[in-house]
Image (cartoon, grey):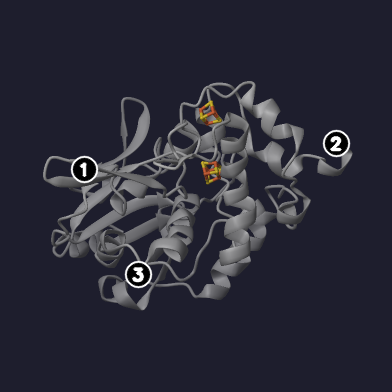
């Protein structure tokens, strides 16, 4: 991949997943060999949606290439595209100018449950690379094909076969139909609320959460990542329609498994497991899928 990396670096600012102090994060990279494979500590959504920015000024976006995005995080962009692409000029401009070179996972990772949401490959995205020893099996979109002309490329059938094999190694949860099983008055929301400390980590670490707050700061209007678990999330001059924590937790899971499914025909989760790992009190989204609602 070094040759393609060098060719791409002539047209793009280069970023990649690198190991820093024992954690994988995204940073600038100068060579392909600097890139480490593995799920990053934080989802790479900041490449398209910044934590905090002035929305009164849409700057020209530099072209960025990001190597080493894992499949579950790429799926996060695929899901966010459905909600945001074409509507949010900041996200749309960055998406147009960002090349994602994705490492397809060879083996299931610890804790991940991506096969519950369709598994690790999305053919329509920019560059897919599946490592096999020193070699990469590549699937490249037309837009970026010119950088890979000297490489042998696979077709969608190769990756479909791989996806089936991968799926046989990771047990999928029974997600289908959760939007009809889940119940508004379930005791699960109060049980979660008895433990949750409203830190918002589950939203901030999620590759699919895109909600934000807007506020004025001098002559700037700032947009900042927000969390539906925080008490001010739905506060307005008319009051707050989700005053209680159990209502806000229910909102989080209804958005992921009911509202998004009904409006976009997708669940708003990639099975990356970050929210489970980051939650200080052990609230596990898998319980929402597995819970026996009819037994309450
Ligand atoms: S597992 Fe949690 S952090 Fe990962 S995509 Fe699903 S909701 Fe978001
Ligand atoms: S990470 Fe856990 S404790 Fe923090 S807001 Fe989310 S559910 Fe609550």
Instruction: State the image coordinates of residue 201 (x, y, percent, origin top left).
Output: 46, 31
Q: CA–CA distance between discs 2 and 1?
A: 45 Å
Circle 2 packing at 10 Å, graded few (<14), some (14-19), many (20+), is few
Circle 3 packing at 10 Å, graded few (<14), some (14-19), many (20+), is few
Q: CA–CA distance between discs 1 and 3?
A: 24 Å
Q: Name the residue under label 3.
A: 86
Q: Earlier in the sequence, mark 2 or mark 3?
A: 3
Identify the residue at horizontal 70%, vertical 26% (top origin): 191
Q: Name the residue under label 1.
A: 216
In-image side of 107 versus 64 (left or right): right
Identify the residue at horizontal 15%, vertical 65% (top origin): 11
User: From the image, which quarter does the C terminus lie in?
Assistant: top right
Which secondary structure lies at badge 3?
loop
Q: Answer whether labels 2 and 3 touch (C-beta < 8 Å).
A: no
- Quarter of the image where one finds residue 149: bottom left
Circle 1 packing at 10 Å, graded few (<14), some (14-19), many (20+), is few
The image quadrant where one finds ligand 1 is top right
Identify the residue at horizontal 31%, vertical 47% (top origin): 46
Mark 2 vs ligand 2: CB below 8 Å = no
């Amino acid at each position: 991949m070094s040759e393609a990396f060098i060719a791409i670096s002539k047209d793009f600012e280069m970023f990649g997943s690198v190991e820093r102090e024992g954690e994988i994060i995204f940073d600038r990279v100068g060579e392909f060999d600097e890139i480490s494979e593995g799920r990053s500590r934080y989802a790479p959504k900041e490449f398209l949606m910044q934590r905090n920015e002035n929305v009164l000024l849409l700057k020209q976006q530099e072209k960025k290439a990001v190597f080493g995005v894992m499949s579950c995080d790429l799926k996060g962009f695929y899901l966010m595209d459905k909600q945001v692409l074409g509507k949010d000029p900041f996200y749309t401009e960055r998406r147009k100018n960002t090349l994602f070179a994705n490492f397809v996972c060879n083996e299931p990772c610890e804790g991940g449950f991506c096969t519950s949401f369709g598994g690790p490959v999305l053919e329509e995205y920019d560059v897919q690379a599946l490592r096999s020893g020193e070699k990469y099996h590549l699937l490249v979109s037309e837009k970026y094909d010119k950088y890979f002309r000297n490489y042998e490329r696979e077709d969608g059938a190769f990756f479909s076969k791989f996806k089936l094999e991968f799926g046989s190694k990771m047990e999928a949860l029974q997600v289908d139909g959760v939007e009809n099983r889940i119940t508004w008055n379930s005791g699960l929301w109060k049980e979660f609320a008895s433990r949750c400390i409203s830190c918002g980590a589950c939203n901030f670490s999620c590759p699919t959460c895109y909600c934000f707050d807007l506020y004025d700061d001098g002559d700037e209007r700032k947009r900042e990542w927000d969390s539906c678990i925080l008490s001010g999330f739905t506060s307005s001059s008319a009051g707050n329609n989700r005053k209680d924590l159990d209502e806000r937790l229910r909102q989080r899971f209804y958005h992921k498994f009911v509202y998004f499914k009904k409006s976009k025909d997708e669940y708003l989760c990639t099975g990356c497991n970050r929210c489970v790992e980051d939650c200080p009190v052990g609230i596990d989204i898998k319980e929402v899928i597995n819970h026996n609602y009819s037994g309450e």
